[in-house]
Amino acid sequence: MIGWFSKLARSENRPRPIAQLGLRFPRCCAEFAIDIARLRQSRSRIKIKVNNVEHEVDVDGDIPLLWVLRDVLGMTGTKFGCGRALCGACTVDLNGMPSRSCVMQVGSLGDSAITTIEAIVGRQVARRDLRSDQGHR
């Protein structure tokens, strides 16, 4: 047992200092600020219509619609499943057709009308309340 431990301690698989790994860090804060400015320039204001409400979001056009719905607009009813449009957890209604929002880029939507589960559930709850007010079960 002691021999195994001493052999491991002498091996070349030990952690090395960052400088020896060849990693490059910005020399100063100015370089970092320039990189952030480039990122901000690549973003644009994109208009999307979700649940009959117009939204203007400040995101890259190649971000999937799922992340805009969840992270930017706060609509967490649409879920992340597989990320490859196989499971259906991210399904939204796009102009009357079911579409997978995890692979749909928000920049390619144009004037499409998007309906999420929040709007569908809201309609069902409203119908249920209407029926109960009328005495139906």
Image: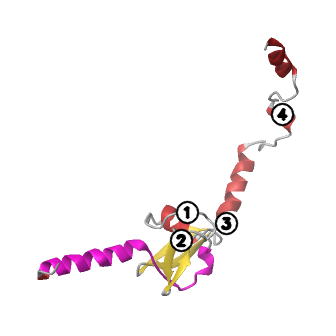
- Give the total of numbered labels: 4
Q: Which residue is mark 4?
A: 19
Badge 3 density bin: few <14, some 14–19, many ≥20, Cα 10 Å: few
Q: Which residue is mark 2?
A: 88
Q: Which mark is residue 41?
A: 3
Question: For the residue labelled by badge 1, is the local secondary structure a helix, a strand or a loop?
Answer: loop
Q: Quadrant of the N terminus?
A: top right
Identify which residue, 8 or 27, lies in the foreground.
Answer: 8
Q: Which residue is mark 1?
A: 81
Q: Amino acid at mark 3?
A: Gln
Q: Is residue 43 above or below residue 130?
A: above
Q: What is the spatial separation of the Cα atoms under label 4 and label 2, in whole angstroms?
A: 46 Å
* The image quarter in which residue 10 lies: top right
Mark sitting earlier along the chain (2/1)? 1
- As drawn, is 18 to the left or to the right of 68? right
Which residue is farthest top?
Answer: 2
Q: What is the spatial separation of the Cα atoms under label 3 and label 1, in whole angstroms?
A: 31 Å
